[in-house]
């Protein structure tokens, strides 16, 4: 505060009191007060802001630096500058390109399928029927299973070709000659996607159900009285109202599913062409110990994410602004 | 919907009575709900079966119920990892709330300049893939001997959940009546007292939602824990990944272990279903 009085030139708007007999002194005081005010406003924010910058931005800056270095933990004597070599290696690496494609497919399929299922189930649960509360609770359960545990459950208790539930049910229904597919090796990516969909459909359903229940019902009733059909009400009133909730659910689902590690790690260990970017980076760094290449892959992931996120952030921000109106 | 509606002309309109379609859709809802619940029910049932009954084809759902799976899980020494998970989740949740609460105040009630940019910044960190910063964090932890230390996870989980909590609490703080804040200011209450006595009671539901979701995400986390901890600070999800052995039957044991590890999340989530929705949507959906 004391240093602020020494610098009267300030871009903070002054009060009308500055137009008095001693304008100079008053300006100084006013600016000092508003500066003190600005700092007292900033103080509560700073711990959280500094903490977040240090723990999320600094490591990423370090990743950028390492991405230009030749650095493999197995060859500690050969650490040096690598220029764009790591990036060239990643971009020409078949596995890395496969990982980018897998990430896109895995995320898009999981988000879209769980969103559509979530919408249908939310519409079903928006009606009154006996035991509605119980069904809602049953629906939430998959989301409350720890992801690793859920992945283990799907891999061993459900998908297993010899004693998993799926093949067990096939045999129980169709007898000894029932087909006994090896679910994971025949469709490794879909095995992962379905396990993810099982966990994330409840999430989508919860947000969309909350959206449905925030509909102004009197307007819907008025439309019904005016002779609107259920389908007209759905397409002209329910869907437009739900739009922002659908966007929100899709966005949040994407944030989490694009980073999925647990299911890929547990169900296939990245094998059978299912390694997504998080798993690919984990493997490059943790198993191959190629720090430079892992960092270059990390930088590429962030660039891709940034492009998607800039658009997405704008959307989410408009949603929240409408919310706070 | 069977509620009555009164139109402006005073007419009372009865909603149409339940049609066969309504009944059918109710049944469909039940079937879908049971379908989603089935894998979980199967996990619970299998966890109470003997290993030999758990691995039959076709399945034997009516096999005798035993506690063998739980016995062999608890005999394999899971307590240190469960305690580590509890420590990391609870302490990081408390840290998140301590940091996020004043920050949310500075972003809503007495907003700093450019508060929208700051809010954007917090959210944008959630888009930054955690793997992108994992290596430097690993190297740094190695240098300062923080590898396999639970405090490293506590700090990282705090930074992982802080943006979510800031967003959530901000939307709750926006509802604090201005008159209450003015009254506190007239009384000469400082920031800490204002937060504690005026703001906190109003945003209690928001704090509870934020705490629930931070706890769940910390408890579930695998990647950081897997890379940055070893035998000492190992958390429950890491313990689970190492639990599957290639020899012998293990299905009942794995199901029991998965259920025990998921239990805190299941209990918290069922007890606070509404808070779950608020937390997941970062306060945008109430």
Image: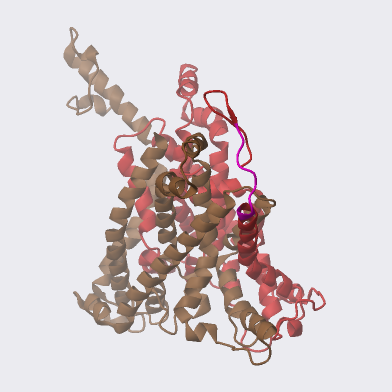
Chain colours: A brown, B red
**Residue A116 spot, x, y in % from top left:** 46, 60
Q: Is residue A89 above or below residue B218?
A: below
User: At which x and y percent is residue A281?
Assistant: 37, 74
Can residue B80 be seen in the rendering of this structure? no
Q: Which residues are magenta?
A: B13-21
Whether residue B235 is in magenta: the answer is no
Residue plotted at (34% across, 27% down): A37
Main secondary structure found in the magenta portion: loop
Task: Name the side, left or right, on which A139 lies relative to B129.
Answer: right
Vertical placement of residue B34 versus A169, above or below: above
Image coordinates of residue B152 in percent, x first then y, are 49, 61
Q: Is residue B169 above or below residue A2?
A: below
User: Image point 31% across, 67% down: which residue?
Assistant: A301
Q: Nearer the viewer, residue A63 or B29?
A: B29
Asked whether residue B114 is in view, the answer is yes
Looking at the picture, tell me which residue is in the foreground, A234 or B57: A234
Residue at image coords 33%, 56%: A57
Quarter placement of the C terminus of chain A: top left
| For residue B143, above or below residue B176 | below
Q: Pick out the residue farthest to the front.
A: A227
Q: Nearer the viewer, residue A22 or A195?
A: A195
The image position of residue B112, as x and y in percent, is 33, 34
Q: Quadrant of the N terminus of chain A?
A: top left
Relative to B112, is A274 on the left or the right?
right
In the picture as drawn, the residue positioned furthest to the top comes out as: A21
- Quarter residue A282 falls in: bottom left
């Amino acid at each position: 505060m004391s240093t602020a009085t020494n610098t009267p030139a300030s871009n903070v708007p002054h009060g009308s009191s500055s137009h008095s007999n001693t304008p100079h002194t008053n300006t100084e005081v006013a600016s000092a007060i508003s500066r003190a005010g600005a700092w007292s406003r900033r103080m509560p924010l700073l711990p959280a802001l500094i903490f977040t910058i240090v723990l999320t931005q600094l490591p990423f800056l370090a990743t950028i630096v390492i991405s230009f270095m030749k650095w493999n933990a197995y060859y500690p004597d050969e650490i040096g500058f690598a220029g764009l070599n790591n990036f060239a290696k990643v971009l020409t690496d078949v596995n890395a390109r496969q990982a980018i494609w897998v990430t896109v497919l895995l995320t898009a399929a999981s988000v879209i399928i769980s969103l559509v299922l979530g919408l249908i189930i939310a519409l079903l649960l928006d009606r009154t029927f006996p035991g509605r509360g119980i069904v809602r609770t049953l629906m939430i359960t998959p989301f409350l299973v720890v992801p690793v545990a859920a992945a283990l459950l799907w891999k061993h208790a459900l998908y297993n070709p010899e004693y998993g539930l799926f093949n067990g049910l096939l045999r129980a229904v169709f007898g000894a000659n029932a087909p006994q597919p090896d679910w994971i090796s025949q469709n490794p990516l879909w095995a992962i996607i379905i396990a993810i969909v099982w966990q994330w459909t409840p999430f989508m359903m919860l947000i969309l159900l909350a959206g449905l229940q925030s509909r102004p019902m009197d307007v819907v009733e008025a439309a019904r009285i005016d002779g609107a059909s259920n389908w007209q009400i759905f397409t002209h009133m329910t869907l437009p109202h739900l739009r922002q909730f659908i966007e929100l659910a899709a966005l949040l689902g994407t944030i989490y599913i694009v980073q999925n590690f647990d299911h890929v790690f547990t169900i296939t260990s990245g094998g059978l062409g299912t390694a997504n970017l998080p798993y690919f980076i984990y493997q490059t760094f943790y198993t191959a110990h190629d720090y430079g290449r892992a960092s270059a892959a990390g930088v590429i992931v962030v660039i891709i994410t940034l492009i998607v996120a800039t658009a997405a952030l704008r959307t989410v921000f408009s949603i929240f602004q409408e919310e706070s109106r | 919907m069977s509620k009555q509606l009164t139109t402006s002309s005073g007419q009372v309109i009865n909603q149409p009575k339940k049609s066969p379609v309504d009944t059918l859709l109710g049944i469909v809802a039940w079937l879908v709900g049971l379908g989603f619940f089935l894998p979980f029910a199967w996990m619970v049932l299998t966890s109470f079966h003997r290993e030999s009954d758990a691995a039959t084809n076709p399945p034997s759902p009516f096999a005798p119920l035993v506690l063998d799976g739980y016995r062999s899980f608890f005999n394999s020494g899971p307590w240190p990892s469960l305690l580590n998970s509890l420590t990391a989740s609870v302490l990081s949740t408390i840290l998140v709330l301590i940091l996020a609460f004043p920050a949310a105040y500075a972003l809503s009630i007495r907003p700093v300049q450019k508060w929208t940019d700051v809010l954007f910044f917090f959210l944008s960190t959630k888009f930054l893939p955690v793997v992108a910063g994992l290596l430097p964090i690993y190297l740094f932890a190695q240098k300062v001997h923080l590898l396999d230390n639970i405090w490293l996870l506590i700090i990282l989980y705090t930074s992982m959940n802080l943006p979510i909590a800031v967003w959530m609490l901000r939307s709750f703080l926006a509802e604090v009546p201005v008159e209450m804040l003015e009254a506190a200011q007239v009384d000469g209450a400082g920031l800490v007292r204002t937060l504690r006595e005026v703001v906190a009671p109003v945003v209690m539901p928001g704090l509870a939602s934020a705490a629930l979701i931070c706890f769940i995400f910390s408890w579930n986390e695998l990647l950081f824990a897997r890379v940055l901890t070893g035998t000492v600070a190992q958390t429950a999800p890491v313990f689970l990944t190492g639990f599957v052995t290639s020899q012998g039957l293990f299905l009942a044991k794995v199901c029991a272990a998965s259920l025990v590890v998921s239990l805190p999340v299941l209990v918290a989530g069922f007890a606070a279903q509404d808070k779950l929705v608020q937390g997941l949507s970062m306060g945008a959906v109430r």
